[in-house]
Image (tube, rainbow, N blue to C red):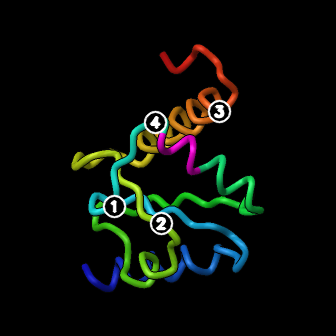
Amino acid sequence: MASVKQKEGERILARIKEREYVYALAIEGKQRASEEFAEELDRLATYGKSDITFVIGGSLGLSPEVMQRSDAQISFGKLTLPHQLMRLVLTEQIYRCYMINAGSPYHK
């Protein structure tokens, strides 16, 4: 299993460019409220970190090398979700962040 995780990590790292700010989605990451996440994304954009990459690991998690390369780790809870569902949840949360930052009533 470690070799599978390692190989997946190598494939992930090969696609990440040096300038990208990387969020690793990991159970052990920090949980954030939507408002906190929105503020964080806004701050990144303000300070020139507009190339943001979100990495969703496989069922075994992310390799230590991917975790080390990440700039931040984020958790959406202790649940294990299928990739497609996690992508949907992440997309909705990013949209929610933009709506919060725009002062839209979508958030509430």
Does 36 appear above or below 51? above
Amino acid at circle 1: Gly
Which residue is depicted at the point 64% across and 74% down? 16
Element type where label 4 sits in the image: helix
Disc 3 marks which residue? 101
Which residue is depicted at the point 66% across and 57% down? 44
Amino acid at circle 3: Asn
Pointer 3 local density, CA inside 10 Å: few below 14, some 14–19, many at least 20: some
Ranked by sequence position, the earlier of labels 4 and 1 is 1
| Label 2 – label 1 distance at C-alpha | 8 Å
Number of marks: 4
Amino acid at circle 4: Ser
Q: Quick check: is 98 in the magenta stretch?
A: no
Whether tag 4 and tag 3 are in contact, CB under 8 A, the answer is no
Does 107 appear above or below 18? above
Element type where label 2 sits in the image: strand
Disc 1 marks which residue? 29
> 37 left or right of 86?
right
Disc 4 marks which residue? 34
- Quadrant of the drawing holding the N terminus: bottom left
| Residue 84, x across and y down, in percent | 45, 42
| Label 1 – label 3 distance at C-alpha | 23 Å
Whether tag 2 and tag 1 are in contact, CB under 8 A, the answer is yes
